[in-house]
Image (cartoon, rainbow, N blue to C red):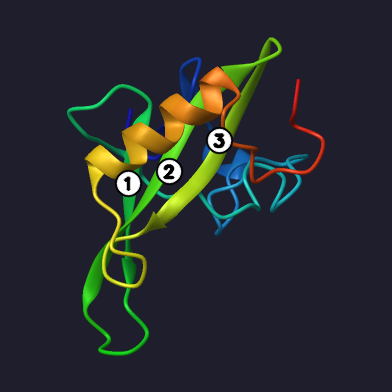
């Protein structure tokens, strides 16, 4: 089997491969041109997640908290705040999420109200 590569179904003849690893007839850049979504990290509170960002004043790493909830049957994701810039904690983000779910506080998103 020397001179053959393995493809999704079996061995592929060398004349079917291109230098970029594409098969003949395959269009480059069609797979995933979009940047991958940044990894969300769970907290101990349901519906509260964070990503790591950079605090612009110091250049240090900080957590950016997001809340997820359903309102009127629609899934809503909102930014709750930044760790240093807004003094946000997972507990505060969970409280914001609770108020938004109960309808006591308006959503950050236009047209997301019930």
Residue, x 70% and y 43% (percent of image)?
Answer: 109
Crowd class of label 1 (few under 14; some 14 to 19; many from 20; radius 10 Å): many
Compared to residue 69, the image places residue 106 above or below, namely below
Q: Is 45 placed above or below 41 here?
A: above
Residue 111 visible in this rendered orientation of the protein:
yes
Please give the label number shown on residue 77.
3
Label 3: how many Cα within 10 Å (few below 14, some 14–19, many 20+) = some
Residue at the image point whose x is 44% and y is 31% from the top: 97
Residue 37 appears in the rendering? no
Q: Is residue 16 toward the left or the right of residue 63 in the image?
A: right
Residue that carries the numbered disc 1 in the rendered image? 50
Q: Compute the Cα span from label 3 to label 1.
A: 12 Å
User: What's the distance in space between the residues labelled 2 and 3, CA to CA?
Assistant: 7 Å
Q: Earlier in the sequence, mark 3 or mark 1?
A: 1
Q: Given contact means CB atoms under 8 Å apart, are the residues at marks 2 and 3 in contact?
A: yes
Q: Secondary structure at mark 1?
A: strand
Position above or below: 73 against 23 = above
Q: Position of residue 61 (x, y in %)?
A: 23, 71
Q: Which numbered disc, 2 or 1, marks the residue that appears first in the sequence?
A: 1
Q: Quadrant of the N terminus?
A: top left
Asked whether the beta carbons under mark 2 and mark 1 sit within 8 Å of each other, the answer is yes
Q: CA distance from mark 2 to mark 1?
A: 6 Å
Q: Quadrant of residue 26?
A: top right
Q: Residue at x 27, y 62 (%)?
A: 83
| Residue at the disc numbered 2 | 66
């Amino acid at each position: 089997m020397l001179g053959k590569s393995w493809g999704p179904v079996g061995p592929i003849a060398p004349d079917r491969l291109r230098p970029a690893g594409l098969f003949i007839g395959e269009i480059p850049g069609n797979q995933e041109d979009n940047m991958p979504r940044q990894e969300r990290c769970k907290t101990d509170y349901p519906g509260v997640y964070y990503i790591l960002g950079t605090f612009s004043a110091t250049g240090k790493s900080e957590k950016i908290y997001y809340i997820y909830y359903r309102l009127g049957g629609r899934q809503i994701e909102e930014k709750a705040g930044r760790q240093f810039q807004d003094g946000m904690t997972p507990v505060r983000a969970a409280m914001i999420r609770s108020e938004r779910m109960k309808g006591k506080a308006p959503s950050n998103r236009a047209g997301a109200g019930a």
